Every structure is written in C-alpha cells, then in structure tokens.
Image (cartoon, helix red, strand yellow):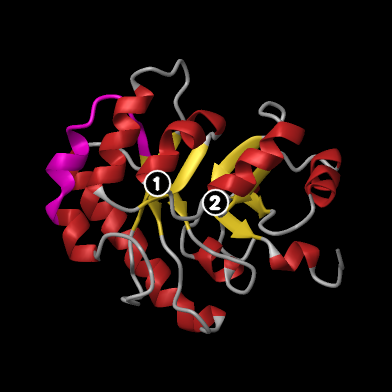
Amino acid sequence: MRSGRPPHSASLVAVTKQVPVEWAAALVSLGQFNLGENYPQELWRKVEVLPAPPVYWHLIGHLQTNKAKKTYPLVGRVHSVDSLKLLSVLDELAAGLFTPGAVCLQVNCSGEESKYGWTPEQILEDAEAIAAFQHVRVAGLMTMAAQGTTAEEARPAFIRLREIRDQLETRMGKSLPELSMGMSNDYDVAIQEGSTWVRVGSALFEGMKA
C-alpha cells in the first residue's frame, strides 16, 4: 500500500534453505507454493518430497554449470544466472525442455567482491549477446544488497537495479518485467522500489527450532 502498487504485483519466494523439509511442507499446506533454495543438492532432496507441481521451485543461489543439467528441469525460476557461460548452458538445456524455467540475471549492485554476478557496466555491454539466446527466457534481473546494511541503506542498490533493467530493456529491445530483490530485513523497501519477487527466509522461521 505504501508503494502504491497492487498486491499481485509483488510475490513471495519462501526461502527454505537449511530448514527441515517438514517446515517447507507446512508452508505448502498454508498455500505458499513458491519455495526457494540456495543450494542445488538441497533442492534435489526437497523436490523428492515436495515435487513440482504443486510447488513452484526457485533456485536463488549460485548454480555451477556442472549442476545445471539436473537442476534446471526441476525449477520454475533461476534467479541467480551470473554469467554468459551459465546462460549459454541453460539456453542449450531449454531447447530440450517442454516448459523451460525463466531466469533472472544477477547484477552485483553493491560492488562486493564476495558476490557473483555482472557489474552494472558489464551487463549493459553484454546486452546484444544476452538478446541473442533463442531458447531460455530472460525475465528480469536480480540483486542482493550489501551485507549488514539496513533497509534504507539497501535502497540505492534496488534503485540501481531498476535503472539497469530499464536501460537493458532498451538495448535488448525486449521486456524484462521481473526484479528479484529484497530479503527478510529489506523486502519492504525493495517492494517500494519495484521488486516483483522478494526472497524471504529467516523472517518466516524466526523463533522456530529444528
């Protein structure tokens, strides 16, 4: 309401990283079908118990190319495509899938060396190469705020991602409607700045013990 956006314009990815599969199942029983995992191996394990459908699985962490073949067919979204090399691998895999998952391209808006992803400058330089892929659907961009920042301190990174998305749309000549940004401590600011997917984990499970 504060952002002046309709409720359906932003969706929750419930991050079930390092929580028991029973907790993830409890979310599903409450009607939360968008679940996110950081690690492919953990996603593989949970998909066996909570298959898609009804769950719509999101990979939100780093995906190594050697794990892409097993992981990509299991997910509806990969939020963390961080290089042209990985995008190329997913494009090849998408050619053989009936309904390949969409992807978001990870942009390192905080400038932290520990984070994966394109720099803002690099992704704009790669716009033509990104647009040339024929099979994988690039739906938008993803970023993470700098570690340890408050919600207000995170706001410039979210604004920057939205600006990059707008520039990339112009260069590619394609719509990129999705912005995956915002976590437990800053999702409200991310929504104010245009997020369409917020990735929330700890706020959902705070106070619970395995």
Crowding at label 1, few (<14), some or many (≥20) Cα neighbours within 10 Å?
many
Query: Is 66 placed left or right of 6 in the picture?
Result: left
Which residue is nearer to you in this view: 30 or 62? Answer: 62
Q: For residue 205, which quarter of the picture?
A: bottom right
Query: Is 42 placed left or right of 27 in the picture?
Result: left
Q: Which amino acid does label 1 sit on?
A: Cys
Asked whether the beta carbons under mark 1 and mark 2 sit within 8 Å of each other, the answer is yes
Q: What element carries label 2?
A: strand
Q: Pinpoint residue 196: horizontal percent, then vertical percent.
A: 52, 50
Crowding at label 2, few (<14), some or many (≥20) Cα neighbours within 10 Å?
many
Q: Pinpoint residue 120: horizontal percent, then vertical percent.
A: 24, 64
Q: Nearer the viewer, mark 1 or mark 2?
A: 1
Residue 191 is one of the magenta-drawn residues: no
Q: Earlier in the sequence, mark 1 or mark 2?
A: 1
Q: Is mark 1 on a helix, strand or loop?
A: strand
**Residue 50 in sight:** no
Query: Is 46 placed left or right of 70 in the picture?
Result: right
Residue drawn 58% across the image and 66% down it: 183
Q: For residue 31, which quarter of the picture?
A: top right
Q: In which quarter of the image is the C terminus?
A: bottom right
Q: Pinpoint residue 135: horizontal percent, then vertical percent.
A: 30, 25
Which residue is nearer to you in this view: 81 or 6? Answer: 81
Label disc, if present, on residue 197 of the rendered structure:
2
Number of callouts = 2
Residue lying at the far front of the rendered structure:
66
Label disc, if present, on residue 5 of the rendered structure:
none
Q: Pinpoint residue 122: horizontal percent, then vertical percent.
A: 17, 60
Query: Is 111 placed left or right of 60 in the picture?
Result: left
Residue 134 is one of the magenta-drawn residues: yes
Residue drawn 55% across the image and 83% down it: 150
Residue underneath mark 1:
104
Q: Residues in magenta?
A: 125-138
